[in-house]
Amino acid sequence: MSTLEDIVLAVVDDVAPFVGQGKVADYIPALACVSPERFGIAVSTIDGRCITAGDADERFSIQSMSKVLTLTLALESRAAALWTRVGKEPSGDPFNSLFQLEFERGIPRNPLINAGAIVVADCLVSDCADPRESVRSFVSYLAGATVDFDIAVATSELETGNRNAALAHLMRGFGNLENPVDRVLDTYFHQCSLAMSCRELATTFGYLAAGGTVPGGGKRIVSTERARRINALMLTCGTYDRAGEFAFEVGLPAKSGVGGGIVAVVPGKGAIAVWSPALGPSGNSVAGVEALRRFVVRTGWSVF
Ligand code: GLU
């Protein structure tokens, strides 16, 4: 029988032909300079092991993967009240789409698209004395390492994030933002700019695999029920407007980011983080999706 170590190495071989396929995100200028030829994978298990291969220790921009972590923080202060301001349905639209938000009167479809994450950031601005620092220290705690913002990426997005500014102004116009747009976007762009490695991401997301506690008998982060619900949102809304196909091919709760990372959760077993910067048309890493698909085929780890 193959060990997890053997399987991770086999996946690296499996995906070699896919690495570099697709296009590195360039709408955030600071992301455009990352080489498409990178690939990393890390698997953390709920008994506290972490198996890695490839560029698993290289830090990259986590971008939208941060949305799960800020949602976890906002649910701590807002609990069920959050769901009056953001929905729980997949959008079926691109992550930065404006038109659904206009039809639906400023209530974003879910917290894992940009508009929803901007509402979540607004909650953190209201509820935390220093929202950036609350996010940074929470993520560092989960990662077991000091993580930091990539200021060049955050600044690049502040200068070019016109669509996000439009989403935020529209929601403020509908009365769904409590704070000025600039303050909310400052938090949002910084959370997206957090730089982390696959090893750190797989470790960070372990609480969602371990029923809400830090793996290895650590602190409770969320209740078992909330962990289950966050996983449900990742499954239905976590991979842009390809969440249905991702569930069909991979069958795990996951969140992707335009930095080329994807993190997937296997409840009761562990978390898998993959990174390869070249993206397919929906914004998911081409080699990353393929790696998760091959991993699931080889291990049989699935929620289905
Ligand atoms: N900061 C990015 C944006 O708002 C996040 C996109 C993503 O990773 O999905 O456009």
Image (cartoon, helix red, strand yellow):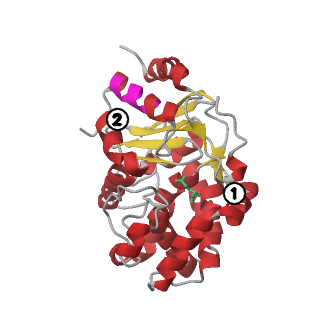
Q: Nearer the viewer, residue 303 or 77?
A: 303
Q: Residue visible at 57% across and 77% down?
A: 125
Q: Position of residue 128 (x, y in %)?
A: 57, 77
Task: Work out whether residue 213 can be spotted.
Answer: yes
Give the total of numbered labels. 2
- Which numbered circle lies on residue 217? none
Kindly identify which residue carries mark 1: 149
Residue furthest to the top: 1
What amino acid is at disc 1? Answer: Phe
Quadrant in the picture for residue 55 = top right
Please, what secondary structure does the residue beneath circle 1 have?
strand
Q: Position of residue 7 (x, y in %)?
A: 44, 20
Q: Position of residue 114 (x, y in %)?
A: 49, 63
Q: Is residue 249 magenta?
A: no
Q: Is residue 57 above or below residue 18?
A: below
Q: Identify the magenta region.
A: 291-297
Q: Residues within 10 Å of mark 1 (few under 14, many from 20)?
A: some
Q: Is residue 118 above or below residue 211?
A: below
Looking at the rendered image, the disc whose residue lies closer to the viewer, 2 or 1, is 2
Quadrant including the N terminus: top left
Q: Is residue 293 magenta?
A: yes
Q: Position of residue 56 (x, y in %)?
A: 61, 33
Kindly identify which residue carries mark 2: 250
N-terminal label among 2 and 1: 1
Q: Nearer the viewer, residue 297 or 165?
A: 165
